[in-house]
Image (spheres, grey):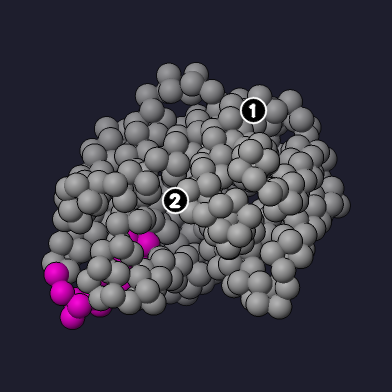
């Protein structure tokens, strides 16, 4: 998994991704807490999360077109500059009347992230190729993302009390600047032609992306399976807090159970690196989804933290396997010329699925028990595995399914 770090440009890209991600996650808890302290409104605090969902849902496919039209290295640099400027606006939020500035800053930052993610996703195969180094790169990114997600939000919450909100904002701004500097040190890759043309050409290229998607069974299957799994996962995430309060003994044990998910995520990264080049992706996805469904069922049948922790770790291991395997297979199946568009569709699907899953999980809790809701979501996860067997072609293990352009 670490072998890919010998590639200088990937090493710099990895540093850029990780640094900017850590800065962002330091504010995941800090921003809503700051808004809550400023306004006393739980609704206002919750809307900070909704503000970050809006751009991916509305602009995802368009962002993919722009990523495929422009130099992806330049897109990532511009996105980081935009995010740094947007987040710096939070330094001027000092009273309830400034609340609008929080939402504007978060929406603009999300727009930058919306451009950065598919650009990075499409740039990685151009840097490391589509062979074994690609699965190593995705596994390493998954591992470091897991570490950041596991530590970033709690660390941000702790630091908020010690150094204050403004200091955390400055750290996030600095993380984007470090990312820009790292990206500036990477080599220019001219695999993507910088296209010209106005709105009409953009719409044409958008149609071209969807035309490819409709005609490629592998890409469509991966998007369907990934989206349905994330929808189920989001609905189950909604259950964790009330389940932890009722069955595990409160917020402390609930937090430990969620940490178990993060531990499993870290274990799953090197595991998927080993498996993704040795098994046809269809069987890897179907098996991992099946085990994840079992883990969900066992978790929500637990009556103590001792029972819940192994189930949480199991979910983390095989849930991360699903995500990394799908991402690697999609990168290999998609010509590089349209990979930005297809990646943006994937991220848009993630945002919509996460939102709908959370809403569905909350709605089901109003009319059914936690266990019934968990069984329904676990069933959807298992169904995703069956869908994988039906719709995803049985491509050879570890090989691209189409030529990169």
| Magenta residues (range) | 94-111
Please name the residue shown 44% across and 44% down the image: 149
**Residue 334: x %, y % from top left:** 63, 47
How many residues crowd mark 1 within 10 Å: few (<14), some (14–19), many (20+)?
some
**Residue 380: x %, y % from top left:** 76, 59
Using the image as rendered, state which of residue 328 and residue 375 is in the foreground: 375
- Which quadrant of the structure image shows residue 155? top left
**Residue 224: x %, y % from top left:** 71, 58
**Overall secondary structure of the magenta stretch?**
helix
Which disc, if any, is residue 271? 1
Q: Secondary structure at mark 2?
A: helix
Q: Does residue 293 lie above or below 40 as drawn?
A: above
Using the image as rendered, state which of residue 131 and residue 252 is in the foreground: 252
| Residue 96 painted magenta | yes
Q: Does residue 50 lie above or below 321 as drawn?
A: below
Please name the residue shown 42% across and 59% down the image: 114
What's the CA distance linking mark 1 and mark 2? 24 Å
Which disc, if any, is residue 91? none
Which disc, if any, is residue 117? 2
| Residue 373 painted magenta | no
- Residue 79, can we see it? no
Give the residue furthest to the bottom: 97
Left or right, 126 with respect to 234, comes to: left
């Amino acid at each position: 998994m670490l072998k890919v770090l010998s590639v200088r440009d990937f090493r710099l890209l990895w540093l850029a991704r990780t640094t900017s991600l850590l800065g962002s996650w330091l504010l995941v808890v800090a921003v809503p807490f700051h808004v809550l302290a400023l306004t006393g409104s739980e609704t206002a605090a919750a809307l900070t999360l909704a503000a970050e969902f809006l751009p991916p849902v509305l602009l995802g496919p368009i962002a993919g077109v722009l990523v495929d039209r422009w130099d992806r290295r330049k897109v990532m640099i511009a996105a980081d500059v935009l995010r740094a400027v947007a987040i710096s606006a939070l330094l001027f939020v000092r009273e309830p009347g400034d609340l609008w500035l929080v939402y504007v800053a978060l929406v603009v930052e999300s727009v930058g992230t919306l451009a950065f993610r598919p650009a990075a996703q499409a740039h990685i195969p151009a840097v490391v190729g589509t062979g074994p180094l690609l699965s190593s790169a995705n596994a390493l990114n998954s591992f470091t993302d897991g570490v950041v997600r596991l530590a970033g939000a709690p660390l941000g919450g702790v630091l908020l009390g010690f150094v204050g909100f403004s200091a955390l904002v400055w750290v996030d701004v600095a993380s984007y600047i470090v990312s820009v500097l790292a990206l500036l040190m990477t080599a220019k890759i001219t695999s993507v032609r910088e296209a010209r043309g106005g709105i009409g050409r953009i719409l044409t290229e958008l149609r071209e992306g969807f035309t490819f998607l409709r005609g490629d069974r592998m890409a469509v299957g991966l998007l369907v399976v990934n989206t349905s799994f994330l929808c189920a996962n989001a609905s189950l995430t909604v259950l964790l807090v009330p389940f932890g309060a009722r069955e595990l003994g409160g917020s402390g044990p609930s937090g430990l159970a969620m940490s178990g998910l993060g531990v499993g995520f870290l274990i799953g990264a090197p595991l998927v690196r080993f498996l993704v080049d040795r098994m046809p992706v269809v069987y890897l996805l179907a098996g991992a989804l099946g085990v994840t469904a079992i883990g969900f069922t066992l978790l929500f049948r637990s009556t103590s933290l001792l029972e819940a922790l192994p189930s949480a770790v199991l979910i983390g291991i095989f849930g991360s396997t699903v995500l990394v395997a799908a991402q690697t297979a999609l990168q290999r199946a998609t010509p590089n010329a349209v990979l930005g568009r297809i990646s943006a569709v994937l991220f848009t699907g993630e945002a919509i699925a996460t939102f709908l899953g959370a809403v569905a999980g909350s709605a089901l809790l109003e009319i059914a028990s936690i266990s019934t809701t968990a069984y329904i979501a676990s069933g959807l996860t298992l169904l995703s595995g069956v869908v994988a067997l039906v719709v995803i072609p049985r491509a050879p293990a570890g090989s691209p399914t189409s030529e990169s352009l």
